[in-house]
Amino acid sequence: MDDLVAGAATLAQRLLDAPELADRWTHVQAVAKRAADLAPTVDVADRELLVAAAWLHDVGYAPALRATGMHSIDGARYLLRQGYPMRLAALVAHHTGARFEAVERQLVYEIDDFPLERGSVTDALATADLTTGPQGQPMTFQGRLAEILRRYPVDSPVHKAMRRARRTLAAQVRRTTNRLAGATVNRPWTLAGDP
């Protein structure tokens, strides 16, 4: 499984480490680090999957992958074509309230190609994304949501979706925060190769 995280990081860098995506790449790196910090909130067997999904959650923003106009679906489809597991692709497809955006964009059939998982992994992935700003800075959930709503016009699918998803996303962050507070870990979980 260590190879999954390393491969995800390498692929994300290849697709997103470009001048026109500088902020996106910085955000993705910070989300992956945040996901590693949140790893104690998920089963041990799912920790590397969580971090790999964090590395890959925004690959659909790469210009070469754009097809539907919805980055989570475009990224998930690409991951399947590259041989990544369906579960990982589905986490990317559905991350951070993506289903709400799919409704706004009339892409429900497309997102339904990916099984919707509910639980600690999806909660932690959303929390990592929603507590990391667009330039990789730590943010509160409320601050991050406000930033997203300011960045997108009121009539955009993203703005509408995030407003509708607010309670669902807040619940995911709250559950993850509670799990983290209750986690008893003898030593912090680290990525392979960390000291």
Image (cartoon, helix red, strand yellow):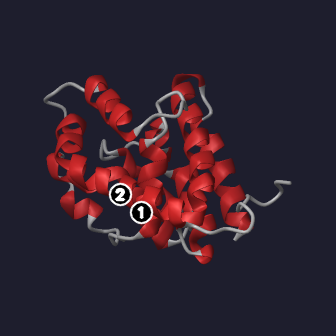
The answer to whether mark 1 and mark 2 are in CB contact below 8 A is yes
Q: Quadrant of residue 189?
A: bottom right
Distance between mark 1 and mark 2 Cα atoms: 8 Å
Residue 188 x, y percent position in the rendering:
71, 60
Q: In the rendering, which numbered label is found on residue 122?
A: 1
**Residue beneath the point at 63% across and 46% down:** 33
**Residue beneath the point at 47% across and 66% down:** 121
Question: Could you say whether the residue bearing mark 1 is in a helix, strand or loop?
Answer: helix
Looking at this view, name the residue that lies furthest to the right. Answer: 195
Q: In the rendering, which numbered label is found on residue 172?
A: 2
Viewer can see residue 98 = no
**Residue beneath the point at 26% across and 67% down:** 112
- Out of 82 and 88, give the one closest to the viewer: 88
Label 2 crowd bin: few (<14), some (14–19), many (20+), radius 10 Å = many
Question: Could you say whether the residue bearing mark 2 is in a helix, strand or loop?
Answer: helix
Residue 169 x, y percent position in the rendering:
30, 51
Viewer can see residue 23 = yes
Q: Is residue 173 left or right of residue 105?
A: right
**Residue beneath the point at 18% across and 46% down:** 105
